[in-house]
Image (cartoon, helix red, strand yellow):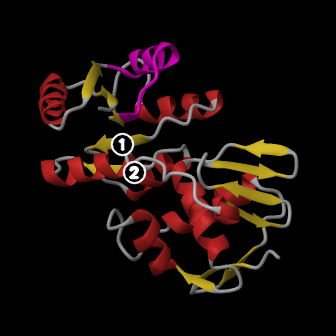
Amino acid sequence: MAKILVADDEERVRTFLSRSLVSEGHSIVTVADGQAALDHLAAHAASLVLLDIAMPRRNGLMVLSELRERQDGTPVVVLSAVTEVAARVQALERGAVDFVSKPFHTAELMARVRRHLAPVPQQREGDQRYLTAGAITLDLDRRKVRLGSMEVSLTEREFALLAHMMRRRGDVCRRDELLSDIWGHAFGPNSNVVDVCVGRLRGKLVDLPVETIRGVGYCFYGA
């Protein structure tokens, strides 16, 4: 059973989500504004957050920024009636693992919740637990990244993208391939979420050995 925090200023949305998630066997806490969400997460652990953007006191983007500053790795799925691409990009840049537009289909949302609540795989044999290239080491079981002696905080999407490219080192990973494998069907083929995520990785990992293949995708060339 997962502990899920629902942050939305509409009571009917909170009630609907609570009923749907409880029927899936989860424990639910609901709050009506962004500050209440931050206060709750400061005091209690959560397995997942469902977060609206337009809320009083602190909006969803402000909540995401604050969680990133705290280095809180709780996965956050944004649920919003804001449909502009810029809003999606901002949410992902600030650490959201997914963005679902309102109105949404319940079955699709529950599938995405299950996906982001999927357990971390058990430890594998030998060195398959780790991916290493130069100074970068990924611990696939603990979902940790080290750059030399320093641990770097990545979102789930950033970690998944980096792991994918490192497994394919030396090969060109097409944008459509990365969209399909990392984001599923959350975004269309013209989305720039891959480029945004690569940009964030380059900002966090100095001298990241990833080459942009113009008009095609990206290639991890680290030894």
Quadrant (top left, top right, bottom left, bottom right) of the N terminus: top left
Q: Quadrant of residue 66?
A: top right
User: What type is the residue that disc 1 sits on?
Assistant: Val
Residue 182 is left or right of residue 30, and the answer is: right
Residue name at image x 53 percent, y 67 percent: 194
Q: Nearer the viewer, residue 75 or 13?
A: 75
User: What type is the residue that disc 2 sits on?
Assistant: Asp
Label 1 SS? strand
Number of other residues with Cα within 10 Å of mark 2, as a class: few under 14, some 14 to 19, many 20 or more: many
Expressed as whole percent of the image width and height from the top left, the position of residue 130 reads 69, 60
Q: Nearer the viewer, residue 104 or 180?
A: 180
Can residue 217 be seen here? The reply is yes
Residue 34 is left or right of residue 219, and the answer is: left
Query: Is 132 a magenta residue?
Result: no
Expressed as whole percent of the image width and height from the top left, the position of residue 47 reads 41, 33
Can residue 105 be seen here? The reply is no
Residue name at image x 35 percent, y 54 percent: 84
Residue 151 is left or right of residue 103, and the answer is: right
Q: Quadrant of residue 86?
A: bottom left
Please report whichever mark, 1 or 2, sits nearer to the chain's N-terminal start: 1
* Mark 1 to mark 2 CA distance (whole Å): 6 Å
Residue name at image x 57 percent, y 31 percent: 72
Determine which of the numbered discs, if any, sits on residue 98 in the image.
2
Rendered view: 122 above or below 38: below
Label 2 SS? strand
Quadrant (top left, top right, bottom left, bottom right) of the C terminus: bottom right
Expressed as whole percent of the image width and height from the top left, the position of residue 173 reads 58, 81
Q: Are marks 1 and 2 in contact (CB under 8 Å)?
A: yes
Q: Residues in magenta?
A: 33-49
Query: Is 42 a magenta residue?
Result: yes
Q: Which residue is mark 1?
A: 78
